[in-house]
Image (spheres, helix red, strand yellow):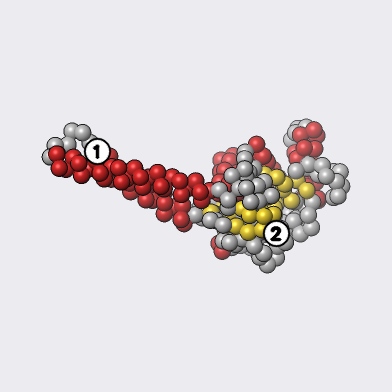
Amino acid sequence: MRVLVGLVAIGAIISATSPADARPQRRTTKHQDQKSKKRAARIHTLREHTRVELRELARGQSVGAPWAGRLQHATELPSGDGYHIRHPWRAFGTQTTIELTLRAIDQTLEAFPDQHVLAIGDISAESGGRITEHHSHQSGRDIDVGLFYLDKPAGYPATFIHATEDNLDCAATFKLLESFLATADDDGGVLMIFLDFDVQGILYDWARDQGISERRLDRIFQYPHGRDSSDGIVRHEPNHDNHMHVRFTCPSTDSGCH
Ligand SMILES: [Zn+2]
């Protein structure tokens, strides 16, 4: 991300300086004219070069599988309003992971502008690979995302908090879940979301009470079909009762991941 921002900054400097030189109404000598033409050509080359580099950086980031892989030319999740990055040294992913995550958070906060800050857990280390406390999170396509509560619990967002029927803000959390699920249509969009079976049940019951059809809920949740069933995109995983773990598919630009 730092590299990307740097390149974008170069682009901004280029575009900030070039139009002034190219203005036709400026009175110039022939010599100056040639000079500015040369400069324009150089700038054009640099801009093309930057564009190619940006494209190269965006592809081939995720290598291997989420549980046996690594990350290269990582994109860093930038800090921003509305969410708290718990471990900045593990906030690296593919560009797709970062962009789609930011979009999902944006969509949720737009619908729930007064919502408390959202805790963001681990994505991957800057070069990916194995990190403590996780089996996966190796190739920049897994992200742990906190939940929303009726009242921001003590200790949150520095830590994840166990969700119960009494503390979970189902409306905001369901919106967050849906916003991630909506990325399924994008290249590199959501593949699976891991969430404790009982917490799925809390959200499922709430959504059904809101009039959301069982057919639609069946496509989303594994609940109520059992912890081992292969229904739904949201699946049970132990130790996931205080956050959701979102896994993105390997983008078509990344030929080295699966
Ligand atoms: Zn996780």
Circle 2 packing at 10 Å, graded few (<14), some (14-19), many (20+), is some
x, y percent for residue 12: 36, 47
Residue closest to the eye, 76 or 119 = 76
User: Can residue 10 be seen in the rendering of this structure?
Assistant: yes
Q: Amino acid at mark 2?
A: Ala
The numbered disc on residue 68 is 2
x, y percent for residue 70: 63, 59
Residue closest to the eye, 117 or 26 = 26
**Residue at label 1?**
22
Which residue lies at the image location 24% right of the left edge and 38% below the top edge? 22
Q: Amino acid at mark 1?
A: Ala
Which residue lies at the image location 60% right of the left edge and 57% below the top edge? 71
Image-based side of 74 in relation to 214, left or right: left
In three-dimensional space, the C-alpha distance between marks 1 and 2, rounded to whole angstroms, equals 52 Å
Image-based side of 60 in relation to 211, left or right: left
Image-based side of 222 in relation to 192, left or right: right
